[in-house]
Image (cartoon, helix red, strand yellow):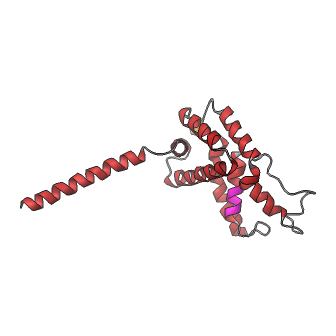
Amino acid sequence: MTSTFARHATRLFLLAQLGTAAALLAGCDSDAHRVCTDITNCSHGGSDDYVSACRDQVDDLSHEATRSGCDTTYDAYFSCAEDHFECTGNRATFPGCAATADALDRCLDAGRANNACGELETRLAACAGTSAGAANDGPPSLQPCTAHGVCLARCYLDSLADVCAPAATELYAFSFCALSCEFSEF
């Protein structure tokens, strides 16, 4: 009987430890992930699907920021957004973060050759003879290449097999992905 009690006590102890570890890990969310949670709770009724999509997008933006040499400005922006979050009605705002948002946008634009904006421009420029490549004299451009623009470009690239000939279902997938780019419009 002692061994049954000991096993039960050990299991309870391990479950308690796992619960504590899970709580600690939940506290390890990044500033960007916490901003997604804030926005979701304020504007989207706490939707698990929305917070998940937002977190995927900020993770993608983090990758794009790294590709563009903008890690520091990305971190500064989301730190500010986390510190200055306000919910008015169902609208999330981040007063006092305009300067860090502008700095991130300028950095992404300067690094566009290395991020999704530049990748999309290059792929669209290769669409010679198609309506996608024949729009102007030069290659198409996402002006300016902001956090929102990088997000949209990444959605477009990831949703379409051929950027020169998008299928209707692919455009639907792009539009669904683009809805998650709201985080970059603070």
Q: Main secondary structure of the magenta part?
A: helix
Query: How far across and down, in percent of the image, does residue 170 sit?
Result: 69, 67
Of the pair 107 and 99, the residue shown nearer to us: 107
Q: Is residue 167 left or right of residue 19?
A: right
Q: Is residue 62 left or right of residue 142?
A: left
**Residue for point 86% across, 63% down:** 133
**Residue for point 72% across, 45% down:** 108
Find residue 97 and report its image quarter. Answer: top right
Query: How far across and down, in percent of the image, does residue 144 sit?
Result: 78, 45
Of the pair 90 and 110, the residue shown nearer to us: 110
Of the pair 17 and 85, the residue shown nearer to us: 17
Q: Is residue 154 magenta?
A: yes
Q: Which residues are magenta?
A: 153-158
**Given the current orientation, which residue lies at the most extreme left position?**
1
The C terminus: image quadrant? top right
**Residue for point 80% across, 47% down:** 143
Find residue 165 and report its image quarter. Answer: bottom right
Q: Give the number of marks.
A: 0
Query: How far across and down, in percent of the image, does residue 88 sit?
Result: 57, 34
Task: From this view, report whether residue 102 is shown above or below residue 143.
Answer: above
